[in-house]
Amino acid sequence: MTLNLFEIFPDVDEKKLHSKYKILRDHLVQSGELKILQEWVSGFVDRDNKIVKEFQTSFHSAFWEFFLHAFLKEAGFEVNYSEDRPDFIITSPRPVVVEAVISEIKKEGRKEDTRDLGDMLDTTEPVVKSAQFDEIIDEAITRHSNSIQKKSAKYLNEYLSLDWVKDSTPFVVALGSYDQIHYGREFTHSMLALLYGRRYNPATKGYTKIDEIKKPGTQASIPVGIFLNEEFSHISAIIFSCTVTLGKLTSMAISEGVYTGANGVLNVRHDMDPPNFKGHIVTIENPEYLSDGVFVFFNPNAKNPLPTDFFSKTNAVSMFEMDGNISAFGENLPIVQRFNFPKNVVHNSMFFGSIIHDFNS
């Protein structure tokens, strides 16, 4: 049965609807984005009859689950939806359980619906050049750590007692980042620090080893390098993305030739060969793929390790820590940041050149 994402619930007042849902409903429904979203939810099973209402009122958690459903299909996995938890029970090519979670803006943080033109202009600056780089990344680390800790506890205290969850089955956390008003800019910086204890230094353009950070605005310490800690050996890997946004729908609609809106998409991608940041204007001929922008961080100390090629049918970038070094491989250059702006801006050579110059300088 296909989900009716725009079902009207008598008990949900218009004021309770999420701003992103209303943008999709009121402005993007005829622009091609909805077709992409419907592709994502095809075959999705709403086991607790809550997902559509959550999509309309809180948005991001449901949106992330819809994307993961499509991502796991792209990977060629078979998923068993007959049990009500964890979120995704992969049965083939091998048993794996996946639990979805998002990092959201803290309660006292600025909300998405307060974004203005100044915020849009701020996003054109590479995050590593921001005077608030450390604060941005530390806030992301704090939010991600909290989300991972919650799912870790849920797995250990609840899921392992279920008959259909075996202690020998790899456990994967799938984390979507929506942690700050300017989400979509953090790339891998927060996760490399949180999981492997590697902190990026914009001044040296290199990484230093750390074992903790200070929670922004406090003196509380947040441990990092958690994948180097035996305490988290039950987590085999973490699927992560900070770019699964409405802009992802626009980019996919352009790529599939179904977009009729007024925007264009410029992706900045990272290359090991200089210049390290390459511009990618999304077109039918030069598309963005579903799993572009996804990273899989493997736990070097996993009790139940995943095969390193487990996501090889996707464009996800797999990342590893081995003997103190970080390695990565994937089919496409990873997306650092996406710009979803009016076509006349994205296709303007001066805008394109300025953005790529800023990232490479």
Image (tube, rainbow, N blue to C red):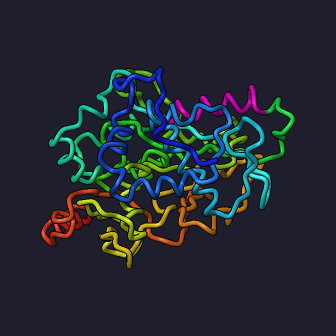
Name the residue: 64% across, 52% down.
43
> Where 357 falls versus 230 (above or below)?
below
Q: Residue at x 22, y 42 (%)?
A: 131
Residue 246 x/y as whole percent: 37, 49
Q: Find residue 332 and report its horizontal and vertical position in percent.
A: 48, 71
The residue lying at 56 percent from left, 37 percent from top is 101
Question: What main secondary structure does the magenta stretch of the protein show?
Answer: helix
Q: Residue furthest right?
A: 163
Q: Is residue 270 above or below residue 300?
A: below
- Residue 109 shows in the view: yes
Q: Which residues are magenta?
A: 141-159
* Drawn side of residue 130 relative to residue 73, left or right: left
Asked whether residue 361 appears in the rendered view, the answer is no
| Residue situated in front as seen by the camera: 292 or 19 | 19
Q: How many marks on residues?
A: 0
63 sits left or right of 99 in the view: left
138 left or right of 310?
left
- Which percent across, then down, holds residue 218? 37, 21
* Magenta segment includes 151: yes
User: Residue 317 magenta-drawn?
Assistant: no
Quadrant for residue 112, please give it.
Answer: top left
Residue at 55% x, 68% y: name it. Answer: 329
